[in-house]
Image: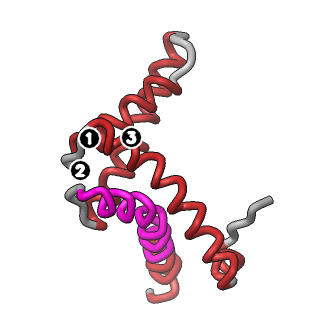
Amino acid sequence: MIEILLPFVMLVIVVFVILMIAALPLYFAVQLLGGKATISKVILVNIYTVIIFAILEFVFNLFGLGNLSIVSFILLIYFYHSFFKLGWIKALIVWFLQIIVAVILLYLMIALGIAAMIGVSLL
């Protein structure tokens, strides 16, 4: 019985770790600008955003409505504004800082050799 459950348990652990790592840049950016965020809230916002964007992408493709990128960007800034209680300008800055923090964390992971263990590459 344990042999059957072990792959599932490992998958749950790996997904949880990936969600935690993916949430860190947004969490640090929101905290830096004084927003109201917890790691669990950031993870939920990330999951919610992916689901909403996947549905929008499907609808846009289904009806041939064209490019979704500007709509997605505005919606993402709105999510940051509403979920983290930030002003519009701060939500935009959070989006930008999230990218910078993600790049810094990626380079730190590479320097520490952690990135190679989880399969991240710059190439």
Tell me which residue sits at (64%, 81%) in the image: 114
| Lateral position of residue 37 relative to residue 77, left or right | left
Q: Amino acid at mark 1?
A: His
Q: Amino acid at mark 2?
A: Phe
Q: Amino acid at mark 3?
A: Leu
The label nearer to you, 3 versus 1, is 3
Q: Nearer the viewer, residue 70 or 47?
A: 70
25 in the magenta segment: yes
Count the numbered circles shown.
3
Tell me which residue sits at (39%, 29%) in the image: 74
Residue placed under numbered mark 1 in the picture: 81
Label located before the other in sequence (3 or 1) = 1
Badge 2 element: loop
Which percent across, then down, holds residue 84?
Answer: 23, 50
Which percent across, then down, holds residue 75?
Answer: 36, 31
Badge 3 element: helix
Residue placed under numbered mark 2 in the picture: 84
Label drawn at residue 92 = 3
Label located before the other in sequence (3 or 2) = 2
Number of other residues with Cα within 10 Å of mark 3, as a class: few under 14, some 14 to 19, many 20 or more: some
Secondary structure mostly seen in the magenta stretch: helix
Which percent across, then down, holds residue 40?
Answer: 27, 65
**What range is drawn magenta here?**
13-34
